[in-house]
Image (cartoon, rainbow, N blue to C red):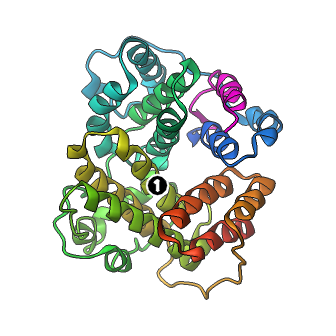
Amino acid sequence: MDDGILDEAYQRLHRTGPEFAGWLSNHGPMAVEALVRHGHGPRVHRWLDDYLRRLDELPRGLRPIDDWRAALGDPKRAGDWLAHFDRELRERPWREVLGDWWPRLLPGIAAGATHGVIRVGHAVRVLRTDGENPQRLAELGQALGYWAARWQPVPGAGPLIGRSDVPAALEAVPRIPAQTGGIRNRLGRLTDVPEWPAAVTALRPPADPAGAERTLTELVHRTALDYLRFGHGNPVMLVHAVTAPTAVLRTLPALDPALWAPSVAAAWSATAAVTSVYAPPTPAPTPAVAAGEPAEVFARAARHGDEHVVKLADAVLEAHAATGDARVLAAAGYAGQLI
């Protein structure tokens, strides 16, 4: 990976806020990390030249975060949260900060349409695999701050108490009847769906940390295949049914194993919620999409240029590496057709 290009990109992006145009998520740090990781660093700065025109300035803080529980989920405190984590990560090791805050943030995994946890997953992958420096620590701080500012629970989520495996649990996810409006409004309708309370806890809980990793790997694998069935319903938002559990899976190795089981439960709740509020009730015929070799799959996504296509390609390449199932690679091409 070309570390220099990524660190330069982070420096450019860290002058911008985590959201723009209302509450659209800034995908820049996630997309450039994926591009650089898969050998497309030369595209990054030209891609950023265009993307940065959309973004807002870094939000200003109001006052220090003293009562963190009261400040969770308050987007007006975004600047305060960014400053809070910037300070924490200057003063303490990043794994220690992540270990303290992961269980506090995890119940609010729906934050920013799951982009809080997704951005954290990308940041942790860099720190774990490529080492730390000020730019990468700053990126983790901005990711955690965004998650905290937009912290939002999935209605009805809690510990897993079901007996279903991943395919059966996904098949049983009910759909909200009126799939209209933004994600916050849609999530609020889940409580009106009689089948939802059972569905959101239906997955069989993992028996041990190894089981947690297997469950998340299968969840990413199956949601990538489901994108081929349901992605036409909302091509952009259904990407997050794949990328949210991918982010959690990437973060597990940096966490205490005691946090792995609740991480699976939260990842499942996010995927189930996105599926319920965006996936159509009836699958489409299998699209005619050539998968190809992993490197070419990602190269096509990079040429496409849309941040969601790039991030989905990044996720399905990991799913393919973990499972050997080449079918998942077609999901990235399908997203490129739809978006």
Query: Compared with residue 220, is residue 59 higher up or lower down, i.e. above or below?
Result: above
Q: Work out which quarter of the rendered image holds the N terminus and state it.
A: top right
Q: Which residues are magenta?
A: 1-21
Residue 18 belongs to magenta span = yes
- Give coordinates of residue 216: x percent, y percent: 37, 61
| Dot 1 amino acid type | Thr
Q: Which one is nearer the viewer's eye here, 2 or 194?
A: 2
Query: Compared with residue 258, is residue 199 higher up or lower down, i.e. above or below?
Result: below
- Give coordinates of residue 299: x percent, y percent: 76, 57
Residue positioned 70% across, 29% down in the render:
9
Q: Work out which quarter of the rendered image holds the C terminus and state it.
A: bottom right
Determine if residue 337 is in view.
yes
Horizontal side of 60 relative to 15 (left or right) equals left
- Give coordinates of residue 270: x percent, y percent: 38, 57
Residue positioned 67% across, 58% down in the render:
309
Q: Which one is nearer the viewer's eye here, 178 or 45?
A: 45
Determine if residue 339 is in view.
no
Q: For the residue carrying disc 1, how many other residues have a C-alpha within 10 Å: few (<14), some (14-19), or many (20+)?
A: many
Q: Which one is nearer the viewer's eye here, 291 or 52?
A: 291
Residue positioned 59% across, 27% down in the render:
17
- Give coordinates of residue 53: x percent, y percent: 77, 33
Horizontal side of 238 relative to 310 (left or right) equals left
- Residue 106 in which image quadrant: top left
**Which residue carries the number 1 mark?**
246
Residue positioned 64% across, 27% down in the render:
10
